[in-house]
Image (spheres, rainbow, N blue to C red):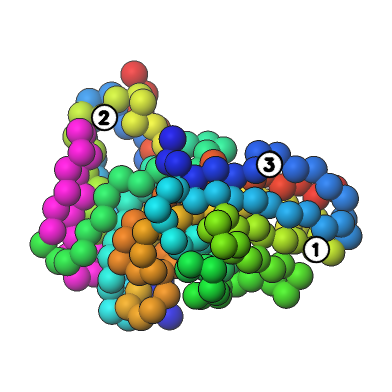
Amino acid sequence: EDQVTQSPEALRLQEGESSSLNCSYTVSGLRGLFWYRQDPGKGPEFLFTLYSAGEEKEKERLKATLTKKESFLHITAPKPEDSATYLCAVQAGGSQGNLIFGKGTKLSVKP
Amino acid sequence: DSGVTQTPKHLITATGQRVTLRCSPRSGDLSVYWYQQSLDQGLQFLIQYYNGEERAKGNILERFSAQQFPDLHSELNLSSLELGDSALYFCASSVGVVGTEAFFGQGTRLTVV
């Protein structure tokens, strides 16, 4: 069964304290791995797509990496506005385009 | 703003009732997806349409149905509502069938009382 597990469930950081979020996956034929950011009561906001092991993407203070079994979202020198829930999702091989989501990591950054 | 529009933003209704949620995808996107998000379950895939045709089905109850119209907007119909159907319902759209990122709307918060 295709599955996505994110850890930790919650993470509290001080402003400027860098850290990483983990996304482990088991999927039959990975077509893509996606990172989203979600603020309370809002829709997920697309951040990155990774397609193959070794690939990396960066955007401001965020950097996403991918291996054959997991992905990391590295947050460098976070700011309070980075506080949100970060969701990881995979798209399996086949003709279906749906995403399988993890339950997310809730990040709080204190000033 | 993702470009995906969902209406209404909030909906409060009684058990046993039927509601319709509406979604307009981003301009140029042919795929529309519906997801349900509850506190304990996370984001759960319900159904995907591509250019008017059903493409994939997830954990969608028989009381729920959806369609995509020729102008590509989509509707999700929820009937015989139960308290447990209270959740956030999101629509997302993407250009292709597979392999491309999906952009989400702001959701419809459904409360069944």
Residue B109 in the figure: left or right of residue B44 = right
Residue B96 in the figure: left or right of residue B25 = left
Mark 3 closeness class: few <14, some 14–19, many ≥20 residues within 10 Å:
some
Which residue type does callout 3 highlight?
Answer: Pro
Please say whether residue B107 is visible from this viewpoint.
Answer: no
In the rendered view, tell whether residue A9 sits above or below residue A101: above
Q: Is residue A68 magenta?
A: yes
Q: Are marks 1 and 2 in contact (CB under 8 Å)?
A: no
Q: Quadrant of the C terminus of chain A?
A: top left
Q: Nearer the viewer, mark 1 or mark 2?
A: 1
Q: Name, please, the residue furthest toward the top.
A: A111
Residue B41 in the figure: left or right of residue A54 = right
Residue at image x 76%, y 70%? B63
In which chain is the residue bearing label 1?
B
What residue does disc 1 label?
A: B79
How far from the left and from the top, in percent, is residue A12? 37, 35
